C-alpha cells in the first residue's frame, strides 16, 4: 500500500496537473462501487464545476472544486493518471473529462480504493476522516511533546502505537520500521516506557519529506525493512524480524534499545 510520502508525491503531481483550474466536463464511472459504494450523485455533483486544487489528509487525496470535494484513497493498487490514447483497461473505474481536453483516470485493479464526495467545510466530520490524528509533517500539531503525552500509560508496542492513525496519520509498516531504526528505538518497547528524549528523536525523523516520484527508489535505501537476516548498515549485526500486529517488523537488536 502506498504510504504517506508516496501519496504526498502524487498529490503534488495532481495539483500541478490541475494548476490551470480546468472545468469538469463529464464524469464516467465503469462500476457502482470500489471498496465502498460510490455516491449515486457522484457525476452530477462534479460535472460543470472547476478544480481549485488538490490537498491531502493522511492517505486521502481531496480534490477541491468550487462546489463538492472529491475524496479519493488509493487502497492497495489505486492510481490517478492522465489518459493516453489506447491505454484504457478493465481496471479503470473513473474517467473525468476536463475542459482542456485531457481526461483524468482512476485505476484500481484490486478495488480497495475509495471514491466519495465531501461537502466543502465538512471534511473533519466525514466518516473516513473524523477519527484521524495529527499530520506528521505538521510541526505545530505533532512533535516530541505531543507524542510523549499520547504515549503515557500505553502498554502497546511502540511500532503498533505509531501506526495507529488516531495517534499520527500516514505512518505505514515500512516507515514505522525505518523511523524506529533511525530513532534507535526497539519496536517491541512499550509505548508508555518511551522517554521524552526518545519521543523527540522519533518525532523528528522527517527524511520522507524528500520523497520523489521516481519509481522503486526508496527500497534501495531501506536500512532495516525487508532486510531480515542481512547485516545492519551501522553495526553489521544481523537484522531481526518478527510479525507484530499482523505486520512484518524489522530491527537491529544492537542499535535499537
Image: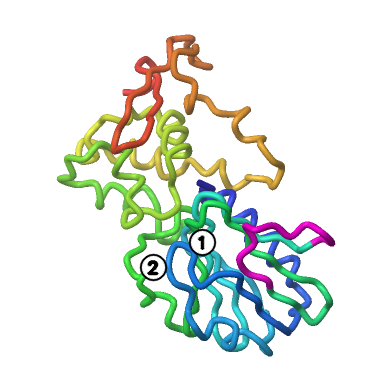
Q: Is residue 1 above or below residue 27?
A: above
Magenta stretch: give its range.
84-95
Q: Is 99 displayed left or right of 39 in the figure?
A: right
> Percent from the top left, x then y, of residue 155?
17, 40
Q: Nearer the viewer, residue 194 or 87?
A: 87
CA gap between label 2 and label 1 equals 10 Å
Q: Is residue 102 above or below residue 184?
A: below
Mark 1, residue position: 73
Label 2 residue SS: loop
Mark 2, residue position: 128
Mark earlier in primary sequence (2, 1): 1
Kindly check if marks 2 and 1 are in contact, taking CB atoms under 8 A apart as contact: yes
> Percent from the top left, x then y, of residue 28?
65, 76
> Percent from the top left, x then y, of residue 243?
32, 29
Quadrant containing the C terminus in the rendered view: top left
Mark 2 Cα shell of 10 Å, populated few (<14), some (14-19), many (≥20) = few
Label 1 residue SS: strand
Amino acid at each position: 500500500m502506498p504510504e504517506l510520502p508516496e501519496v504526498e508525491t502524487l498529490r503534488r503531481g495532481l495539483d500541478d496537473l490541475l494548476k490551470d483550474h480546468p472545468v469538469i466536463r463529464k464524469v464516467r464511472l465503469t462500476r457502482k462501487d470500489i471498496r465502498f459504494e460510490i455516491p449515486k450523485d457522484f457525476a452530477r455533483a462534479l460535472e460543470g464545476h472547476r478544480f481549485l486544487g488538490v490537498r491531502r489528509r493522511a492517505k486521502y487525496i481531496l480534490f477541491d472544486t468550487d462546489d463538492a470535494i472529491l475524496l479519493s484513497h488509493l487502497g492497495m493498487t489505486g492510481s490517478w493518471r492522465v489518459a493516453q490514447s489506447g491505454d484504457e483497461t478493465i481496471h479503470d473505474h473513473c474517467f473525468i473529462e476536463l475542459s482542456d481536453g485531457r481526461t483524468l483516470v482512476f485505476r484500481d485493479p484490486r478495488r480497495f480504493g475509495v471514491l466519495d464526495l465531501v461537502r466543502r467545510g465538512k471534511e473533519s466530520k466525514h466518516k473516513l476522516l473524523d477519527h484521524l490524528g495529527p499530520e506528521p509533517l505538521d510541526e505545530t500539531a505533532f512533535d516530541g511533546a505531543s507524542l510523549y503525552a499520547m504515549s503515557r500509560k500505553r502498554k502497546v508496542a511502540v511500532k503498533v502505537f505509531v501506526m495507529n492513525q488516531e495517534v499520527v496519520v500516514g505512518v505505514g509498516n515500512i516507515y514505522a520500521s525505518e523511523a524506529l531504526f533511525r530513532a534507535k528505538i526497539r519496536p517491541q518497547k512499550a509505548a508508555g516506557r518511551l522517554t521524552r528524549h526518545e519521543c523527540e528523536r522519533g518525532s523528528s525523523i522527517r527524511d520522507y519529506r524528500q520523497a520523489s516520484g521516481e519509481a522503486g527508489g526508496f527500497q534501495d535505501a531501506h536500512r532495516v525493512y525487508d532486510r531480515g537476516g542481512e547485516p545492519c548498515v551501522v553495526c553489521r549485526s544481523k537484522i531481526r524480524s518478527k510479525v507484530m500486529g499482523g505486520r512484518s517488523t524489522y530491527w537491529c537488536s544492537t542499535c535499537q534499545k
